[in-house]
Image (cartoon, helix red, strand yellow):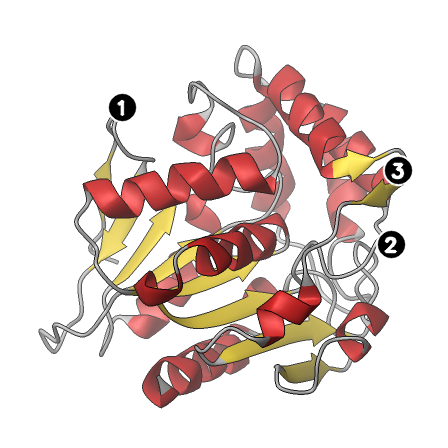
């Protein structure tokens, strides 16, 4: 992938993938989940590149934004994303968010309706109080590669073969000064005791842009049943034998749905 990595105090670090066909359509902006970074979208950006420009951000406290001035819950990250879109002079974008990034994308859309052309949410946070808070807290504090591997297995469907490099890379990232403390602090802002804070689902249903939600039946972080409670106007796509990481488990299906949503807008 031909990727341009940019870092600035005025906007979040990001990877940019230009479209092969030179299209000037609104870009697809990708927001990762808790404990991830922009590199988790590499395969998705590659698959989108024939026809769409894409940008993957590091959220505050993650990746190269570890030392971002303000870290915290999805609301804090949404403000940083909105500021970054403004600084980069992106007037209209298609937002894609996974897990915590899904909650971030939703908040950006609720705050600035005109800027968001479509919204695609993968196992998004904030659509119900239930959350595997024990797993997320352990994941935030983990540093040992073997422990990290066991924890990461819980994020995927039961039949998915976890690539060895994922646990190794994640453990290496935690070795950076302040990484564990930062993720632990973010986890405590996301989790309210043993539940998560929720989004205004009624207001989400009133948003004018097309919204798709993608979920796996074997999600052990956020239960799939949260998608069953969404307003009927929101399109939901439930995949059997898929866990909390659909963009890594079924990338072709995810790309197809992202493009469908973007094209319908």
Q: Quadrant of the N terminus?
A: bottom left
Q: State the residue in front, 187 or 21.
A: 187
| Residue at 50% from the left image edge and 32% from the top image edge | 62
Labelled disc at residue 9: 1
Report, in whole angstroms, how far the alpha carbon at label 2 lies from the one at label 3. 12 Å
Up-down: is 166 above or below 210?
Answer: above
Kindly tell me whether residue 250 is visible in this rendering: yes
Residue 25 in picture, x, y percent from top left = 18, 74
Up-down: is 221 above or below 183?
Answer: below
Residue that carries the numbered disc 2 in the rendered image? 130
Question: Left or right: where does residue 146 sit relative to residue 82?
Answer: right
Up-down: is 64 above or below 124?
Answer: above
Labelled disc at residue 134: 3
Residue 7 in picture, x, y percent from top left = 25, 31
Report, in whole angstroms, how far the alpha carbon at label 1 lies from the one at label 2. 35 Å
Is the residue marked by circle 3 packed among few (<14), some (14-19), or many (20+) residues within 10 Å?
A: few
| Residue at 55% from the left image edge and 51% from the top image edge | 101
Residue 197 in picture, x, y percent from top left = 76, 46
Looking at the image, is mark 1 or mark 3 earlier in the sequence? 1
Q: Secondary structure at mark 3?
A: helix
Report, in whole angstroms, how far the alpha carbon at label 1 lies from the one at label 3. 34 Å
| Tag 1–tag 2 contact (CB < 8 Å) | no
Given this view, does label 2 or label 3 mark the residue nearer the observer? 2
């Amino acid at each position: 992938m031909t990727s341009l990595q940019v870092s600035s105090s005025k906007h979040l670090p990001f990877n940019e993938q230009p479209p092969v066909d030179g299209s000037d359509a609104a870009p697809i902006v990708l927001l990762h989940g808790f404990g991830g970074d922009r590199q988790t979208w590499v395969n998705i950006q590659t698959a989108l590149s024939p026809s769409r420009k894409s940008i993957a951000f590091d959220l505050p406290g993650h990746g190269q934004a570890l030392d971002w001035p303000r870290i915290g819950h999805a609301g804090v990250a949404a403000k940083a994303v909105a500021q970054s879109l403004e600084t980069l002079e992106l007037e209209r974008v298609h937002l894609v968010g996974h897990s915590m990034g899904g909650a971030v994308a939703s908040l950006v859309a609720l705050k600035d309706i005109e800027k968001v052309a479509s919204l695609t949410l993968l196992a998004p946070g904030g659509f119900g109080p239930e959350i595997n808070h024990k797993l997320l807290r352990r994941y935030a504090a983990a540093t040992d590669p073997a422990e990290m591997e066991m924890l990461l297995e819980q994020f995927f469907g039961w039949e998915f073969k976890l690539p060895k490099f994922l646990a190794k890379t994640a453990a290496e990232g935690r070795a950076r000064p302040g990484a564990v403390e930062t993720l632990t602090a973010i986890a405590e802002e996301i989790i309210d005791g043993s539940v998560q804070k929720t989004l205004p689902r009624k207001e989400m249903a009133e948003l004018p842009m097309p919204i798709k939600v993608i979920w796996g039946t074997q999600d052990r972080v956020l239960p799939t049943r949260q998608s069953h409670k969404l307003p009927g106007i929101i399109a939901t796509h439930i995949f059997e034998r898929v866990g909390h990481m659909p963009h890594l488990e079924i990338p072709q299906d995810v790309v197809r749905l992202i493009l469908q949503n973007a094209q319908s807008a």
